[in-house]
Each structure stands twice: as C-alpha cells, then as structure tokens.
C-alpha cells in the first residue's frame, strides 16, 4: 500500500521523471486550487547522454508556459532540473530539498507515482528532517485503478 498523508504544505513536489505526467500535474493544480499548498515544484530528470525523441530543447520553458495556460502564475511554479545519476531518488531529494530550504519552505506534499511512493517518501523524509522540512506523501495511480484490477489468469494458462 502506498502511504498517503493529509494536511497542508508550503509546496507540492511532483517527483522527477524525464517527462512530466498529466495526472501528476492535475493533482498538483487541484492541491493549489483547494489551498492545500501555495506553490508547485516540478522535478525534471535530465540525462546528459540520453535524449528523448521529439522533446523540445526548451522543455522547462514549455512546462512553465503550459502551467500558465492552466491558470498558474509564474511565481507559483518552480522547475528543478536534476541529473539522472544513481541513486536517483536520493540525489533528487538532496537537490530539491536543498533548493526549497533556501527558499524558506518548511513543508511539502510529495506526489509520487503508485509503487514509488513509499520509497520516495522515506528518502525525502530522511533528507528533509535535518533541513526542517516536513514531507507529506501523496500517491497517484497513472496506470491502474485498484477497483478495476482483476487477475483472470489461472495457473494452468501460464506456460513455463
């Protein structure tokens, strides 16, 4: 089970990937609209040697523009670029929370994809504690809806 916390925070952090998922952005915007948070932090992983096909070179600018189209102001949005270096989540948390700490952030809702939530929460929480940043976990399920998942394959149908 993915942990899910309650309460308000200074910002919502959308955990990093090489592309920002629509579901995560929707959740982040909803949290700002409902006043659970005042700012949105998009974490964007970028590898110096891997290239995503057909992604524009100014992806960060595009992200900010698309959030403005959806009603957010520039001062509500922060995009943090993190290198795609292992251990990914630990490096990401250190870079993101260090930056947010300098901005005076003391609490953050961490939006992470389904099964990554537990690991990401514990890493962000561990990094955030000495910085005085409380982390509230919030999973999102982009691929599966638990109430519609049904295992219909019997052991006899599986061929080894």
Image: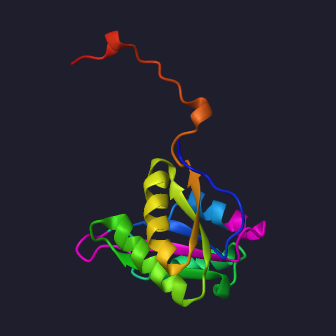
Percent x, y for residue 9?
A: 67, 71
Q: Which residue shows up at 57% across the image and 52% down it?
A: 140
Start-end of magenta stretch? 29-51
Figure label count: 0
**What is the image's colouring?**
rainbow
Q: Is residue 53 visible?
A: no
Percent x, y for residue 55?
A: 40, 71
Q: Which residue shows up at 72% across the image and 67% down it?
A: 8
Percent x, y for residue 57?
A: 39, 81
Q: Is residue 96 visible?
A: yes
Of all residues, the one furthest to the right in this rendering is 34
7, above or below 63, in the image: above
Depth order, front residue of 34/1: 1
Side (left or right) of 128 relative to 55: right
Of all residues, the one furthest to the bottom in this rendering is 102
Side (left or right) of 37 relative to 86: right
Q: Which residue shows up at 56% across the image and 61% down it?
A: 111
Of all residues, the one furthest to the front in this rendering is 130
Q: For residue 7, what is the image quadrant?
A: bottom right
102, above or below 146, in the image: below
Q: Does the magenta run of residues contain 9? A: no
**Quadrant of image for the C terminus:** top left
Side (left or right) of 140 relative to 122: right
Q: Which residue shows up at 58% across the image and 70% down it?
A: 134
Q: For residue 147, what is the image quadrant?
A: top right
Depth order, front residue of 12/5: 5
Q: Does the magenta run of residues contain 43? A: yes
23, above or below 56, in the image: above
Percent x, y for residue 139?
A: 56, 53
């Amino acid at each position: 089970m993915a942990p899910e916390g309650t309460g308000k925070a200074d910002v919502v952090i959308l955990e990093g990937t090489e592309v920002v998922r629509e579901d995560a952005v929707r959740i982040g915007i909803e949290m700002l609209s409902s006043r659970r948070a005042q700012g949105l932090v998009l974490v964007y992983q970028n590898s110096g040697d891997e290239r995503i096909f057909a992604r524009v070179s100014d992806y960060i600018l595009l992200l900010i523009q698309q959030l403005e189209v959806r009603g957010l102001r520039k001062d509500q949005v922060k995009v943090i670029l993190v290198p795609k270096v292992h251990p990914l989540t630990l490096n990401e948390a250190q870079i993101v929370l260090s930056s947010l700490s300098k901005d005076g952030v003391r609490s953050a809702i961490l939006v992470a994809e389904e099964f990554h939530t537990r690991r990401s929460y514990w890493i962000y929480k561990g990094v955030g504690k000495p910085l005085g940043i409380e982390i509230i976990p919030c999973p999102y399920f982009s691929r599966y809806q638990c109430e519609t998942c049904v295992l219909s394959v019997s052991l006899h149908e599986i061929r080894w």
